[in-house]
Amino acid sequence: MLGTIAKTFAKDIAVHTYTAPEEGWVVNTQIIELPAELFIVDTQYMLPFAEEVAAYAAKLNKPISRLYVTHFHPDHILGAQVFNMPITALAEVKSKIEAVGDRVAAEEHEKHGDRIAKTAVKPTQIVAPGRETIGEIQIDFIRMQNAETADALMIAFPGRGVLVAQDFLYNRVHSFLGERSFDTWAAALRDYQLNATKYRILLPGHGQPAGVELYGENLAYLSFTKRLLQDVRDPAIFKSRLVSAFPNYAGRTLLDHESRFLFPPKSASA
Ligand SMILES: [Zn+2]
């Protein structure tokens, strides 16, 4: 297998975290194993890695009852065709993928050819923020706004202390800053940090599962990069300063992806 699997157990649920290798942006698909079914959260960037996720999930011998995509970024949506089932998303995320998903797919397909989907599979089912109970297990669906992206889904299991945060949190992987919501993202991180006893197991969208230390690490990264972006106008210098400040961080391919968002060509309009 090209990716890696980390397993996290909390009472009667397990989360199998598939992490892609560097060329797949170190992105995670979370396979949430409930007593009688599986939820899959996010679908990978490259098709070969999505296929590894599907093969791994099949071996768990439980039906995949839901396939969620948390937000519209390419590394979360472009593997969806491999799963061949309806996609569930927040209403805002569904609309966004309908509006720009095919353009996003075409841009990434052009970089990598047939390892990337040509078009985006559109969500057909909506999840509303709120609580659902399956058997004994409470599940909270949370709409996170203006953090890594304008609208993102998080899935929490309050009775199990588990937060499937996806790209609200990164673990030692360079974060995607292209939407530039430094202040609102940091404010939300501080809110969660203040209530850190609520969830002790955090599942980030990139990098390994971890604990509440992730809030502080993500805050430090955001404050460093916000200041760096005020000082530096050159994408190559930005990247090299960031790499030397965080030498052990994976996801340098993500820095290349975000460059055109942080340093748009001068001729381009907003
Ligand atoms: Zn991501």
Image (cartoon, rainbow, N blue to C red):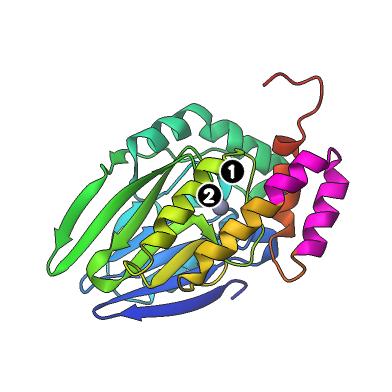
Q: Looking at the image, which residue is at 84% across and 37% down?
A: 233
Amino acid, disc 2 = Ala
Q: Which residue is mark 1?
A: 182
Please state the extent of the stretch shown in magenta in the rendering: 225-245
Q: Residue 245: x and y, percent?
A: 78, 63
Is 169 on the left or on the right of 116, as rendered? left
Q: Residue 115: x and y, percent?
A: 64, 53
Secondary element type, mark 2: helix
Numbered mark located on residue 192 in the image: none
Is 98 on the left or on the right of 251, as rendered? left
Q: Looking at the image, which residue is at 46% across and 35% down?
A: 97
Q: Looking at the image, which residue is at 57% across and 59% down?
A: 218
> From mark 2 to mark 1, how far is it between C-alphas?
6 Å
Q: Which residue is mark 2?
A: 186
Question: Magenta region, mostly helix, strand or loop?
Answer: helix
Residue found at the far left of this picture: 135
Question: Residue 129's image quarter?
Answer: top left
Q: Is residue 91 magenta?
A: no
Is 253 on the left or on the right of 38, as rendered? right
Question: Is disc 2 surrounded by few (<14), some (14 to 19) or many (20+) residues within 10 Å?
Answer: many
